[in-house]
Image (cartoon, rainbow, N blue to C red):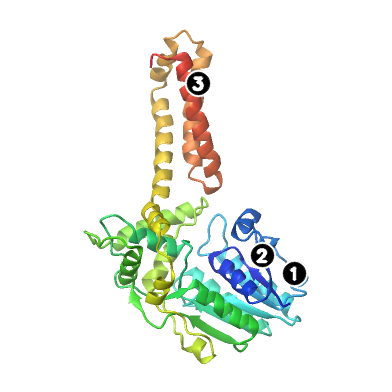
Amino acid sequence: MRKAVVLGGYGLIGAACMRALAAAGFAVTGIGRSRRTALASNPDAAWVIRDIPSIEVAEWRELLADADVVVNAAGALQDGARDDLEAIHVTALLRLVGAARNLALRIVQISAAGAAPGASTEFLRSKARGDAILAEGARNWVILRPVLVLSPEAYGGTALLRGVAGLPLILPRVLPEARAQTVHVDDLAAAAVAAARGEVPSGLIADLTEPDMQSLAELVDRIRHWLGLPAPRFRPTLPRAILHLIGWGADLLAHLGWRSPLRSTALQTLSDGVRGDPAAWQEAGGKPCRSLPAILESLPATRQERLFARFYFLLPLAIATLALFWCASGVITLIDPARAMMVLGERDIPPWIVTATVFGGALADILLGLAILCRRCARAAALGMIGLSAAYLLGSLALTPDL
């Protein structure tokens, strides 16, 4: 049985490639840095839990010793608390190519449409540098460049499109002049399998895209119709200044661990247009990718899709509300601590307990409000909020039941 190794095997594209390769008869091993996410994605698969950019050439030789093909689906949109574009798109590929130079295997690189040294975003420029390293240093390689990937799984840009399309009553026109093409994630995975099998020649660089193109506004309209939602009553155009502000805020949150699809890189990429040319892939004998209507027809639009779309923006709203509420609670107490202490002081509670309760509670409120903004701390902060709320409730019942 032929063996395939998939880098970034639990991401949207990597997971699809792992499933398709396994169905095609490959023994598949996935590589990723989170065991929990890997097992949630595919608990029955073989996994190597490693931070891909940290793997040195010698370790790559061991990992690839008996592999027939490597599919590189690892990537990141933008630098942030958890991501380094140079490390994942360039350094990791440089080491991988160095390790594979004397091995009889094919490397299939999942790049991105528009990757070029002079592209407007570091995401596409770093992808281009990685592609160049592969083309110059590997013996047997194929580079696939997908456009906007649509999938049954709501993830990243696909989730954002559903969320915007699911807004009640309103459908903002975002970047109305932007043009976009799409590709079904299964068509992308099938292309990776075809490349892994050697059905397309080495040295191929091909965009994976539907033949047609539509405006971003048309794309969102089609998704709203696919969801079965009524036509919006209002279609305001979102000014670019507001988009820049949203992107700046999303970039800030990225440094706290939140990978928002509204970051400035994503907005700039959409503004430039997500486009490709299917000619190279079809001339190499690749199967044509489905059109947008065919993609949407093949995807289910069930109750769960509609619920997800309607509630998509409630998570950031809930986090922002909690952060504001808890920080304000602590700050208001510290502005006038005497008034807060008076509530307990009138009930013959020892002063040291009153002082510790008021100041300790205020500081705890502020710390929890700030902590929930950090992705890594959000779960613990939410549990802390529940615990502290319970402590306030029980304490008030015991000490100030009249309130």
Q: Nearer the viewer, residue 378 or 129?
A: 378
Q: Is residue 181 visible?
A: no
Amino acid at the residue labelled 2: Ile
Numbered badge on residue 357: 3
Q: Quadrant of residue 16?
A: bottom right
Sequence-earlier tag: 2 or 1? 2
Mark 2: few/some/many CA within 10 Å (<14, 14-19, 20+)? many
Residue at (54%, 90%) from the top-left corner? 285
* Between 83 and 18, the one nearer to me in the picture: 18
Real-space Cα separation, disc 2 to disc 1, in angstroms: 10 Å
- In the rendered structure, find residue 38 and report the number of the disc placed on it: none
Crowd around label 3: few <14 · some 14–19 · many ≥20 (10 Å): some
Determine contact: label 3, label 1, CB under 8 Å.
no
| 187 left or right of 141 in image | left
Q: Nearer the viewer, mark 2 or mark 3?
A: 2
Q: Is residue 356 above or below residue 50?
A: above
Q: Nearer the viewer, residue 154 or 62?
A: 154
Q: Are marks 2 and 1 in contact (CB under 8 Å)?
A: yes
Q: Secondary structure at mark 3?
A: helix
Say which element carries label 2. Answer: strand
Amino acid type, mark 3: Thr
Mark before the other along the chain sequence, 3 or 1? 1
Q: How many marks?
A: 3
Measured Cα–Cα span from mark 2 to mark 3 = 49 Å
Q: Residues within 10 Å of mark 1 (few under 14, many from 20)?
A: some
Residue identifier under label 1: 63
